[in-house]
Image: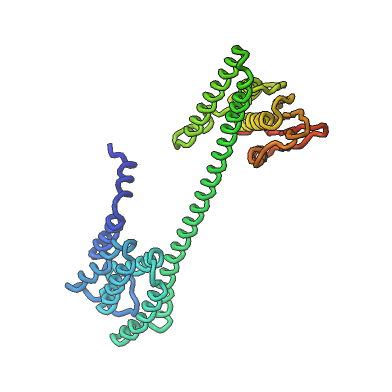
Amino acid sequence: MIDLRRVTDLWRQCDVVVRDLPFGLLLAVASLLPALHGKGTQVGDLPTRPFDALAFVVIALECLPLAVRRRWPAVCLALVSLGFVLDQFRAYHVFASNAMPIALISAGAHLERHRRVTVVLLSMAYVPLALALGRLGATERVEGYVVFYLALALAWGIGAWLRSTRAAEAERRRHVAEATRAAERTRIARELHDVVTHHVTAMVVQAEAARYLTAAPDRLDATLSAITDTGRRAITDLRHMLDLLKADHDTDAGMPSAGELRTLVEQTRWAGQPVEFAEEGSPAEPAGSAEFVTYRVVQEALTNALKYAHGSRTVVRVRYGEKEISVAVSTDGSGSRAGSPGGSGRGLAGLRERVDALGGEFSADRQAGGGFAVRARVPAGRPS
């Protein structure tokens, strides 16, 4: 059986002239049918003449140029107009004369340069055409010529409207593409910040602690193992991010979720941060956007605790409800650096945008007794 989809694809791959040619040929063949003699577009009301050799030339001039109506619209319009004028002077009134409004629509839609000049020249040429038809005995009244001119102007106007509509759609698609690219760049920047900052911070803290453990080989070995595990986790997360850039990759597959919080907390403890962790309820299965954002909130808060309040008591509380997930991460501090959670503030700003995108609430404030607290309320039960 013939695969219609494949045939359609092959047809679309053909040159535009090849795709436009059949219509002109079909119009030419129809013009030769006796039943359609005298059924063309006409002005002046001259008596219809029978076909002669010149009639076939007129049909060719009016039909064949339609093959280039999109590639070279000015050439098409000029040739079709010449054939139309000859048709009106000789009064063949062939069916092919209906190509005139088609050529005008195509020119209005696809002509790129000298559009105003084209309109002026065609309008100026219409006056001598009407006068010449009058000398040949045409019975058309003045209002008839005016109505016919307005009909031709309408055909051009339709083409111009199609052109403006196409341009507006192209501009809209360009804006959508730019907005999509900007959103994707922002998303990738957030993921890079979350992944790299957390893991690298943990590795730096662990490496600094390892300096003072040379006299305790067991603890030194455990610390170096933790650094290795953290590095491997960073590589895994970065590879996952690269996979996300592939068009055929499932963006939800392998994304960190709230169910991995215990692993995250344990890694932070290995880095030397005393963390108390408490969970109420259980995360949804499969994990969705709310669980992913929850994971990122806790991850960024623990990263800041490692960087600016290392060794201070940190409490992580997560409560899973039917309609929302509540997160609270607080860090005790001496008041020296714990109240300043981030160099550029990009991580907290990214978290706020993530939570806001889901319709939740986010806050990050200093505590009265020193330290810092990050709180978030993330609506759950939404499709990821």
Image coordinates for residue 90, horizontal then vertical, percent: 25, 78
Furthest residue in direction top, as rendered: 218
Q: Position of residue 324 (x, y in %)?
A: 70, 31
Q: Residue 311 is drawn in which quadrant?
A: top right
Where 343 sits versus 306, above or below?
below
Name the residue rendered at 67%, 28% in the picture: 306
The residue nearer to you, when weighing 9 against 54, is: 9
Residue sitting at 49 percent across and 32 percent down?
250
Identified at 38% across, 64% down, the residue is 110
| Vertical order, 247 against 260 (above or below) | below
Q: Is residue 126 left or right of residue 347?
A: left
In the picture, residue 75 is in which quadrant? bottom left
Given residues 313 and 105, the one toward you in this image is 313
Q: Position of residue 277 (x, y in %)?
A: 71, 21
Q: Is residue 221 left or right of residue 152?
A: right
Residue 284, relative to residue 61: is it above or below? above
Report which quarter residue 183 is drawn in: top right
Quarter in which the C terminus is drawn: top right
Q: Is residue 305 visible?
A: yes
User: In the displayed image of the protein, which residue is found farthest to the right?
Assistant: 368
